Image (tube, helix red, strand yellow):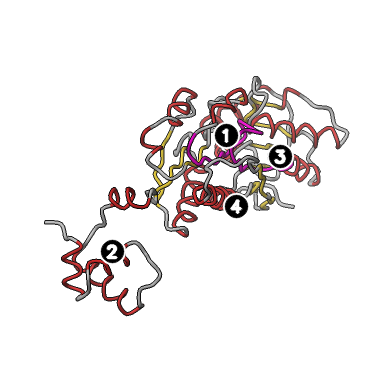
Amino acid sequence: MAATLHDVAQLAGVSIKTVSNVVNDYPHVRPSTRERVQAAIDQLGYQPNLSARSLRSGRSGVIGLVLPELSLSYFAELADAVITQAESHGLVVIIERTGADRSRELAVLSSPRMRMTDGVIFSPLGMGQEDAALLNVDFPLVLLGERIFGGPVDHVTMRNVEAARAATEFLLAAGRRRIALIGAHPDEELGSAALRLKGYEEAVTAAGLPYDPALVRSTTLWHRANGAEAARELIESGVEFDAVFGLNDALTLGAMRALQESGRRIPDDVAVIGFDNIEEAQYAVPSLTTIDPGREQIAQRAVDLLVQRIGAEASRPESPSEETVAFEVIVRESAPA
């Protein structure tokens, strides 16, 4: 039988009100009393009734995190960073996966599960700029990613164009002149692929080199298998290249496998740079030079902004914040300086 507040109070030798104050983290409890109550809670395995607490406070202590997928390391590591930051605010995170499907992303905005949370951090891939007005919801919402800009909610994103330009410039500074790009989305006007391709084009043009479409390889998904397939197609085409810029690390790691299978040496024959700085990048052979887009900063700012909106009288600010975080080139073996 589950332990009750009365059981905890009896074991700790305090009133039920005192136990309630400890459970709800009220500040005016003597440290010695708090320790005694907490010891009783731990001994009995008491679990607070969160539904009742939510009814009393109007808050659940839970936030939602909506992501396209978790199989990509970037999103898994982002989720971990969000959870860590949320814990520092005493919040629990529930995760919803949409599969980058627009209809599922729209559904989550009206999902009863999300409405039971205090607020939501939302990273869409299926929705686009034309859907900006649909973010006008009646609960605190912080937007991530590069699909929608200038919407009615706070937005935290990375410097995609500048970071991709820096990645390309890094390869150019190393003497590479035929830089292939893997991961383009030809029909995309706004999004990570379009913005990173723009940065690549800017760097190539600024270096006085011609933009060669034969060096730009498209993929649907940004997974390892797609990167390997694109690199094999590049090799089989016969086009000359001395560097590869993958638009995320998963693509790039797949491309590295295909390059090595073809007998090309990294970085001697082909210098390689990725984007995301996932943990696996530092353990690849050779280790992967990549862009750290500021994932930890994104998680921190998103959670902090959401907490501010939850604590505000109005859940949606009149002037939403549009924030970008800093990036860094992480130099490793695949493209040494």
Residue corresponding to mark 1: 258
Q: Which element type, helix, strand or loop, lies under badge 3?
A: helix
- Dots 3 and 2: beta carbons under 8 Å? no
In this orientation, does residue 284 appear?
A: no
In this orientation, does residue 94 appear?
A: yes
Check disc 1 and give the amino acid type: Ala
Among the two numbered marks 2 and 1 on one chain, the one whose residue lies closer to the N terminus: 2
Check disc 3 and give the amino acid type: Ala
Among the two numbered marks 4 and 3 on one chain, the one whose residue lies closer to the N terminus: 3
Check disc 4 and give the amino acid type: Gln
Residue corresponding to mark 3: 164
Residue 228 at x, y percent in the picture: 56, 32
Label drawn at residue 20: 2
The label nearer to you, 4 versus 3, is 4
* Quadrant (top left, top right, bottom left, bottom right) of the N terminus: bottom left
Residue 331 at x, y percent in the picture: 68, 53
Q: In the figure, is residue 55 to the left or right of 270?
A: left
The label nearer to you, 2 versus 4, is 2
Disc 2 versus disc 1: distance between alpha carbons? Answer: 61 Å
- Mark 1, other Cα within 10 Å: few <14 / some 14–19 / many ≥20: many
* Region in magenta: 138-163
Q: Does the magenta stretch include residue 77?
A: no
Label drawn at residue 41: none
Task: Looking at the picture, tell me which residue is in the foreground, 258 or 298.
Answer: 298
Q: Is residue 262 above or below residue 86?
A: above
